[in-house]
Image (tube, grey):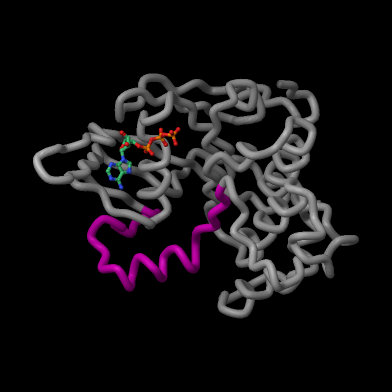
Amino acid sequence: MLTTARTRSPVLSTEAITKVYRSGPVAVHALAGVSVSLFEAEVVVLLGASGSGKSTLLNILGGLDQPTSGRVLFRDQDLSAMEDAALTEFRRKHVGFVFQFYNLVPSLTARENVALVTEIAGDPMPPEEALDRVGLTARMDHFPSELSGGEQQRVAIARAIAKRPDILLCDEPTGALDSKTGITVLEALISVNRDLGTTTALITHNVEIRRIAHRVIYMADGRITKVEENSAPIAPSEVSW
Ligand SMILES: Nc1ncnc2c1ncn2[C@@H]1O[C@H](COP(=O)(O)OP(=O)(O)OP(=O)(O)O)[C@@H](O)[C@H]1O
């Protein structure tokens, strides 16, 4: 099995980004000057209180939203200067998203849910391979209603990785799951990172999960307050909460 070494090459970087949401006279400063990089093949966990700006940052990194000021770079491309169509192309080619709720199409099987994405991707892996990587070979022809929450989330991960994205962005992927099921989901994410070298960023409210990451980024009030390096990440099976 291929093991990809982490390097210090940034895949995605932000330079002093801010995000201000305005509704009428009220302005919410969701990001107040964030400079951060995600490096090749690393796993990063983002921690911070509710409202600290984690999802806003993840959405901007993934090209779902634009900063109010500052720059976002994907390798040498400036995402913050892109029109919507170019940003959509960036997302389609380079980013996989996993959210708390799995957003699967209920009338399609696991295999068909993944195939929806592989049909429009440039160099996808077969849906069967993507599902195998998350341990769902035996469940490929099941509908979402026939799968557990953890299995549905693993289908969502298979769908996100099938296009071989450079970056996988996960917003509370275990938020709706009990701990045992959450661990199977984290194991799927870590195995994809290890085998494919997919740079992975994961938001969680669960501080124990930080122990599986190479780096931990702490946020408060729209800023990064601390970044920790973890020289010896542990396996998800060793995490308990
Ligand atoms: N579309 C929006 N319009 C107005 N305010 C917003 C919008 N999206 C987020 N905010 C505000 O921006 C701030 C940061 O929100 P964000 O969702 O990024 O935080 P978070 O750390 O991900 O929180 P949580 O852990 O609760 O998901 C919050 O004060 C939030 O209310």
Q: In the visual, does 142 lie left or right of 74?
A: right
In front of the other: 201 or 170: 170
- Could you tell me which residue is drawn at 40 percent across and 39 percent down? 37
Judge whether residue 139 is colored magenta.
no
Q: Farthest residue in the right direction?
A: 138
Q: In the visual, does 3 lie left or right of 12?
A: right
> Could you say where residue 27 lies in the image, as x and y percent from the top left?
16, 38
| Image vertical order of residue 238 relative to residue 76, above or below | above
Image quarter of the C terminus: top right
Q: How many numbered callouts?
A: 0
- Could you tell me which residue is drawn at 62 percent across and 54 percent down? 102
- Could you tell me which residue is drawn at 61 percent across and 63 percent down? 164
Judge whether residue 82 is colored magenta.
yes
Range covered by the magenta-colored residues: 74-99
In front of the other: 120 or 153: 153
> Could you say where residue 10 lies in the image, as x and y percent from the top left?
44, 44
- Quarter of the picture for ligand 1? top left
